[in-house]
Amino acid sequence: MRRLLLFCLFVIGLSAAIFGFLNFQGLAAKGEFETILLDFREDIPQEVVQQKLEAITQQYNVTPRLDNKFSARDNVYIIEGDKKRLKKLRKSEIAKATEFIEPNYIYRIPELGKIAHLAEFDSPGDNETTRATAGDPNDPMYSKQWHLHNIGVVGAWNQTKGSGVTVAVIDTGVTRVRDLVETKFVKGYDFVNDREEAKDDNGHGTHVAGTIAEATNNYYGVAGIAYEANLMPLKVLNEYGGGTVADIAEAIKFAADNGANVINMSLGGGGESNLMKEAIEYAHKKGVVIVAAAGNESQNSAAYPARYPRVIGVSALGPDGEKAPYSNFGAGVDISAPGGSEAGKVLQQTIDPETGEAVFLGLQGTSMASPHVAGVAALVEATGVNEPDDVLKVLKESARSIQDDSLNYYGAGQLNAEAAVTRASQGQISFQDFFRWLRDNGYLNPRFWIDGGAVALLPKIAMVLGSYLLAWFLRVYFPFAWSWTLSSGLIAGSSGLFFLKPIYIFDLPQWPFRLLGSSIPELGNTLQGTNAFNPLFASVLIPFVLVALLLGHSQWKWFAIGTSLGVAACLGVSAVFDPAVWGLGSGMVARIFLIVNALLCLGLARLAVKNEEQPA
């Protein structure tokens, strides 16, 4: 029986691992493409490259071409093709002359960020006006920019406004509308049309650029975050909001080679690209902070490129400070920032794509959240913190921590511009700031858990110790020997392997860790990532079933007994610390329910042990 159960546990664990691996592969390969990338090795002569290109032309009846004028230095060519042609190329002799052959994935503006889906911001009713305070800029519509108030940008401006920092906006281009006339620009490039002027024909990129560095204190329009910074417009998305990995990767390298300190990418899609990863690593090594939108599919993982390592993935907040309904979350999200919702959109000046005229528009999406982080990163850079990892550390440690975030809606927390600049400027925070940070992150709260998440450390320890004390109490009156099955039941019922709950492995589903890190009473709510107990699981029901099934087995009945004691300890401690139960609330009714079931579990264990002592 023991071997059978161990074998079943092994099969379950193996299945979960295989599922996670397959899901990882599916996420990485999910994406649309119309062309194929061929990255030829740089150590082979150009004559050989040309021979391979001619062979492709003859064999597949297509004409290989450079994606743009910068592609030649990297030996990157593209051809038209689908999955079938991609497989053939990878198996051909041509593959030996390449570093890789992969889809030229299409990334797009996240759906909610499309201009056509949103109304013009032309009346006070479109958003709540925020009351003016001392230090506010003189821009007439700043009072409607709730999102800048949300991140405390005025406090950050007391220390820096981003002077000397360059932010590359990799998007649909940027048009210098009236409220961007005073903003400083540096040379950019249009990778879609292969020309130097990166003019916007969609409106998305101009809106994003405005959040980062819209002219401020100019008695006109709205404000931007790092309004003394330089903007580098890099157009990689066409008028319909779509663009290829090849263009985006070259834009990242262009930004790194031409003095950009920060890159913002309010775009995304499916499909992992080696070319993109190489470009990101290249820029990161050159000291560039890279920020990207998590995506608007409300999925449990960020889209690419936010999901790549070295990229700061940003989820979106609504005006209420909660995760916006559309925002992606989970793996790949590093921090959250205002992105807007139907209750209030992010206001900037941009162009109407139909007419090309300048308009003030309220948009919503992670596209709008990402430039908030890029703008604050520029402010942090302006204080002298220049290494990408150091900038990310400042952003994370200064963020407003969210305690109950088991599904990683918010990453390290909610963006706080004032705290970020203060932390970056001071280098070392004061004792007052330090203790405030400890308090805000839960370290001065006895209910904290090491990741600031939903599980409290001290209550978990109390649950484990409590289960062992209950077992010791029973052992005094009904002597029995300790066993590994009893100990396993005590842990499974009281706490589970709770230290596994906060573990995130890049691009893999997190639910197996939440499952293993949950006690039996928590299994009913662990996949949803909520705190409130499911009353069917947080009761005597499961221990009763286990005792009924295993009582006749000489060894595994002790697992059932241990589980009953563990559940009793878990419910008893939870009744004191966090008595939330579905349908019962978190008041006295929920406490009574948990205490009664804890006593029933204890009584069940006592009956099972007493039965063991009776002669057969």
Image: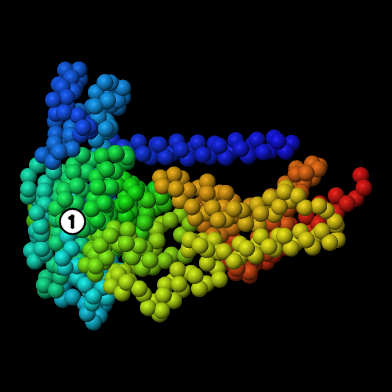
Q: Position of residue 101 (x, y in %)?
A: 27, 30
- What residue did someone put label 1 on? 260
Using residue 225 as the reference point, say whether residue 476 is left or right of it.
right
Residue 572 position, x and y percent, is 68, 64
Task: Determine if residue 361 is in view.
Answer: no
Task: Identify the coloring.
Answer: rainbow
Residue drawn at x 86%, y 61% is 477
Tag 1, which secondary structure? loop
Other residues around mark 1 within 10 Å, as few (<14) / some (14–19) / many (≥20): many
**What is the quadrant of the C terminus in the image?**
top right
Residue 100: image x %, image y %? 28, 32
Amino acid type assigned to the residue bearing label 1 in the image? Ala
Front-most of 155 and 520? 155
Quadrant in which the N terminus is drawn: top right
For the image shown, how many numbered marks are present on the structure? Answer: 1
For image coordinates 18% across by 63% down, the residue present is 165
Residue 365 at what x, y percent from top left?
29, 55
Q: Quadrant of residue 397?
A: bottom left
**Going by the image, does 399 lie left or right of 492?**
left
